[in-house]
Amino acid sequence: MGTLTDLITLLVDFVTSHAQILGIWVAAFFTLCIYSFLYRDNPFYRFAEHLFVGLSVGFGIVISIHQGLIPFAWDPFWEAVTKREFMGLLKLIPIAIGLLFFARLIPKYSWLIRYPIAILIGIGAGRAIPNVMDAFIFRQVHGTLTPFGKIHAGELGFFAIFGAILMLVGVICTLTYFFFSIEHRGVVGRISKVGIIFLMVGFGSAFGNTVMGRVSLLIQRVDFLLSDWLRLI
Amino acid sequence: MLEKLMSIDRRIVFILVAIAVIIPTLLNVRFPITVSQPTRSVYDFIDELPPDSTILMAFDYGPSSLAELEPMAAAVLRHCFSKNVRVIGMTLLNVGARLGDRVMSQTSAEMGAVDGEDYVFLGFRPGGISVILGMGTAIDSVFSADYRGKPLSEIPMMQDVKNYDHIALVLDLASSGTPSTWIAYINTKYKQQVAAGVTGVMVSELYPFIQSGQLVGLMPGLLGAAEYETLIDTPEKATAGMSVQSFVHLLIFVLVVVGNVAFFIQRRRAQ
């Protein structure tokens, strides 16, 4: 028994003193496991993928418990009980409503889940509608038309005027493409075809930025492998 | 030859991309970075803030976006600490808590910033929109303590920062749709200035908010980080990364052109 304890202590000491190096080797191993998928699907990739998903979920749950459930539900409830501040027990109402989400797990009472969902949708829609309408529609329309006021006041240069007109044309043509109450023939058809060009430019921009983002991830991993792991840089 | 080109094994493309990344990384190639206006706008806004102003940085990203957003976070933090602009850190994503704490601790140690006086990291609170709106009323109603459990009432820099009225800028470093949420709920409701630093994947959808004035500025992925490093004259990982990126973009450009030319030649021959 003593030998086993000594062995565990020795192992813990070793891991603690070499934590950084071990961390780098583990990270390098899993990086290579993930990239091995580029050759073909294999057990190393599957192992790394499953471990990543499991760790992410586990980490998320622990953080949510420590930074959400405990300070917002458990601590106020326990304080109310221990200090006999019974007004604090009002917290039990939202806690109980939240717990109704788990009614889904009991088929007989699964209908109870409708109450928390109804409350969430009601609050969410009530909060979202005025703000989202303002931010994503009114302010965007305002932003599209404001430059024309500046053009009228003579505040914009040639390229800014060109940009403002191009943007207005783009908005009108793209919206026309998504307007299905009129058949896309004749003038409407031609305008919607111009809208397709603007959409393609938009998709191209998004694709280019996506490539940049994905390559950035590769560069960071290669940098890690070459500098931290292999120490070639 | 043409048939071989059209049916090239995708793994050969992977090897070419790997070579295009590894060789420039080993050779430590550096190209000059040209700064775009949206990134400069973020820099200018922070640069013009008087000392002891406060900005809020939301670290709304996870490990999968670390490569693009952590260099950006570090560059902005360096700028803030050098200008004596105080920083409140927080996150709406549970996986962002550890990452935000890490970059704030590392950068503050490097710049000599003091926890509780020059910066504070509040961590994560679940709720998303409720958290954003709650902080508009009172920050301590949402975050009663910082990430390490120290009550906000005992943190010196939080004595005069109670809600968005005392925050000059909210900068959201995001890998998901949170910038739109910040814009919709605090720019619209509280007239709070908002800026964003986002992954390359989502930058296109946020450009309209610059035109409308709902975003002060926008930093696009690793490029935004490299631009900010250039502006503060501290080239780091992002600057090196963007130089390597240029080689990969060149390779992809060549592959796209060759692929299209081969496709059209093959189609003409078939006709």
Image: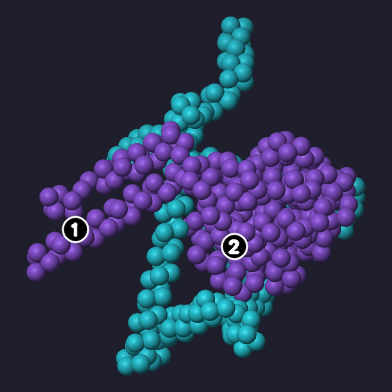
Residue located farthest toward the top when viewing the structure as drawn? A3
Alpha-carbon neighbours of circle 1 within 10 Å: few (<14), some, or many (≥20)? some
Q: Position of A114 compared to A213: left or right?
A: right
Residue drawn at point x = 31 percent, y = 40 percent = B15
| Numbered disc 1: secondary structure | helix
User: Based on the displayed image, in which of its 4 quarters is residue B20 positioned?
Assistant: top left
Q: Are marks 1 and 2 on the same chain?
A: yes
**Of the pair B156 and A61, the residue shown nearer to us:** B156
Please name the residue that numbered disc 2 is placed on: B38
Q: Are marks 1 and 2 in contact (CB under 8 Å)?
A: no
Image quarter where the C terminus of chain B lies is bottom left
Q: Chain of mark 2?
A: B
Amino acid bearing label 2: Pro
Q: Position of residue B8 (x, y in %)?
A: 20, 48
- The residue labelled by disc 1 is B262
Relative to B109, residue B65 above or below: below
Residue at the (65%, 70%) spot, across then down: B214
Q: Is residue B25 left or right of residue B17?
A: right
Q: Which chain hosts label 1?
A: B
Residue placed most toward the observer, B25 or B156: B25
Q: Colour of chain A?
A: cyan
Q: Nearer the viewer, residue A120 or B222?
A: B222
Q: Position of residue B190 (x, y in %)?
A: 75, 70
**Label 1 to label 2: alpha-carbon separation:** 38 Å
Element at label 2: helix
Q: Is residue A53 in view?
A: no
User: Which color scheme is applied?
Assistant: by chain
What residue sits 43% from the left and 69% below the top?
A: A202
The residue lying at 88 percent from left, 52 percent from top is B159
Chain B colour in the picture: purple
Residue B253 at x, y percent in the picture: 33, 55
Mark 2 Cα-neighbour bin, 10 Å: few <14, some 14–19, many ≥20: many
